[in-house]
Image (spheres, helix red, strand yellow):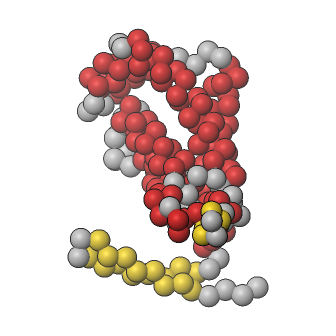
Amino acid sequence: MSSTEVELRSTIGGFTATGKLHTLSVWFILALRLMMGIAFFQSGFGKVLSGSFSAAGYLQNAPPSNGSPVAGLFVAMGETPWFVSFVDIAVPWGEVLIGLGLLVGAFTRLAAFWGAFMMLLFYLGNWDISHGYINGDFAYMLVFLSVAAFGAGRILGLDAYIEAYEIDGQPLVERYPWARYFLG
């Protein structure tokens, strides 16, 4: 087994951060992608199979009862029938699709973005700061963002093949650079 360190360097807003990753890190990045894929697929699949998922009660009651700073927004969403109908479909099927995307490593950045967005909403809706501002929902949001940042779909995933797919003799991500925001 051969392993080395890979140097990373990033500059944002005039600040530069550098670091070194051990090449074994790739396995942990893969593990994070698969862990979140399994968690979301299982959660969504259970909701889809039950056929009885409804977000209305949660939206109207949970955030106000836990003191969420955006409780009014959640209540308004819960009192809007078309929005509740949308959420009743979007949450279970969104979890299934995000989970599948992560499990097979396809459209990983897109899946991770929507996973992080859902976790942000869960964080705000499940507001509990009795032990500080960081809880499981917040941590999962950061895991999703890490999966996206590391391009985890290229690690034993379909994104590596999708990115390399040639269109008129040119790899897809070279022909359409914007595709990198969805793949990886």
User: x, y (%) of residue 141?
Assistant: 46, 49
Q: Quadrant of residue 80?
A: top left
Q: Quadrant of residue 92?
A: top right
Image position of 11 (left or right of 28): left
User: x, y (%) of residue 33?
Assistant: 61, 56
Does residue 98 sit above or below 77 in this rendering? Answer: below
How many labels were placed on the picture?
Answer: 0
Residue shown at 29% from the left, 71% from the top: 12
Tell me, yes or no, if residue 65 can be seen here: no
State the residue in front, 107 or 116: 107
Tell me, yes or no, if residue 118 can be seen here: yes
Residue shown at 65% from the left, 39% from the top: 41
Residue shown at 51% from the left, 49% from the top: 110
Name of the residue lying farthest toward the left = 14
Give the quarter of the figure containing the N terminus.
bottom right
State the residue in front, 60 or 86: 86
Q: Quadrant of residue 162?
A: bottom right
Name of the residue lying farthest toward the front = 168
User: x, y (%) of residue 160?
Assistant: 65, 65
Does residue 81 sit above or below 48 in this rendering? Answer: above
Name of the residue lying farthest toward the right = 1
Does residue 4 sit above or below 136 in this rendering? Answer: below
Give the quarter of the figure containing the C terminus.
bottom right
User: x, y (%) of residue 125?
Assistant: 38, 31
Image position of 90 (left or right of 37): left
Residue shown at 65% from the left, 55% from the top: 105
State the residue in front, 120 or 63: 120
